[in-house]
């Protein structure tokens, strides 16, 4: 069961603006890919239980502090050619970013998806696929509401 609203944060400016406006709880928030090394004091001043930090960078001790207070922290997964915590769909320019297809993000991602997997690769693929599913749902919903 979900309580409250889900807030997706992918920029420090958005986080800072919401905190400055008086946000006291990050419950239901998904914070993705942010460098939070200078935000430790701000995070210490708000409720973080039931929040999710994906691929964020923390100052020493801050990650453990938010975990102790009930946040879920998912690490950056290095060595994979996809963005496991992606919040938007890929554009053709992103997927086909170089002159030769074999060097493109799309080709590297496909080759990676076909090889034998370790636990980190399986986690990265599952997270990526789920993130893309959510982005596709948002994109189709936006198309229905504007049409």
Image: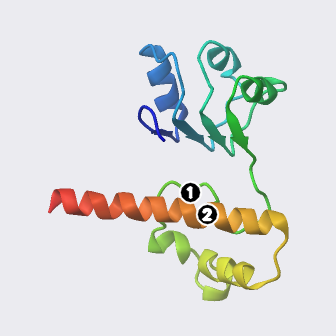
Q: Is residue 45 visible?
A: yes
x and y percentages locating residue 4 in the rendered image: 42, 31
Where on the picture, by quarter, is residue 144? bottom left
x and y percentages locating residue 61 in the rendered image: 83, 24
For this view, does 10 lie left or right of residue 67? left
Q: Which mark is residue 67?
A: none
For this view, does 46 lie left or right of residue 20? right
Considering depth in this image, is 54 or 57 the residue closer to the camera? 54
Where on the picture, by quarter, is residue 116? bottom right
Q: Which residue is mark 2?
A: 128
Q: Is residue 82 visible?
A: no
Q: Nearer the viewer, mark 2 or mark 1?
A: 2
Residue found 65% across the figure and 39% down from its top = 53
Q: Which residue is mark 1?
A: 86
The answer to whether the residue labelled 2 contacts the one labelled 1, judged by CB atoms less than 8 Å apart, is yes
Q: SS of the residue at dot 2?
A: helix
Q: SS of the residue at dot 1?
A: loop
Work out which quarter of the rendered image holds the C terminus and state it: bottom left
- What is the C-alpha distance between the residues marked 2 and 1? 7 Å
- Other residues around mark 2 within 10 Å, as few (<14) / some (14–19) / many (≥20): some
- The residue lying furthest to the left in this view is 147
Mark 2 or 1 closer to N-term?
1
Above or below, 138 relative to 47: below
Where on the picture, by quarter, is residue 97? bottom right
For this view, does 43 lie left or right of residue 17? right
Residue found 45% across the figure and 23% down from its top = 18
- The residue lying furthest to the front in this view is 1
x and y percentages locating residue 145 in the rendered image: 19, 56
Above or below, 92 relative to 19: below
Residue found 24% across the figure and 63% down from its top = 143
């Amino acid at each position: 069961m979900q309580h409250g609203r889900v807030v997706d944060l992918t920029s420090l400016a958005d986080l800072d603006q919401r905190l400055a406006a008086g946000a006291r709880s990050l419950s239901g928030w998904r914070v993705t890919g942010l460098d939070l090394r200078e935000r430790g004091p701000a995070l210490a001043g708000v409720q973080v239980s039931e929040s999710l930090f994906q691929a964020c960078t923390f100052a020493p001790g801050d990650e453990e502090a938010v975990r102790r207070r009930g946040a879920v922290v998912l690490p950056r997964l290095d060595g994979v050619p996809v963005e496991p915590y992606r919040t938007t769909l890929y554009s053709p320019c992103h997927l086909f970013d170089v002159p030769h297809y074999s060097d493109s993000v799309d080709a590297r991602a496909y080759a990676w998806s076909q090889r034998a997997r370790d636990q980190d690769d399986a986690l990265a693929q599952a997270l990526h696929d789920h993130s893309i599913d959510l982005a596709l749902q948002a994109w189709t919903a936006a198309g229905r509401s504007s049409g």
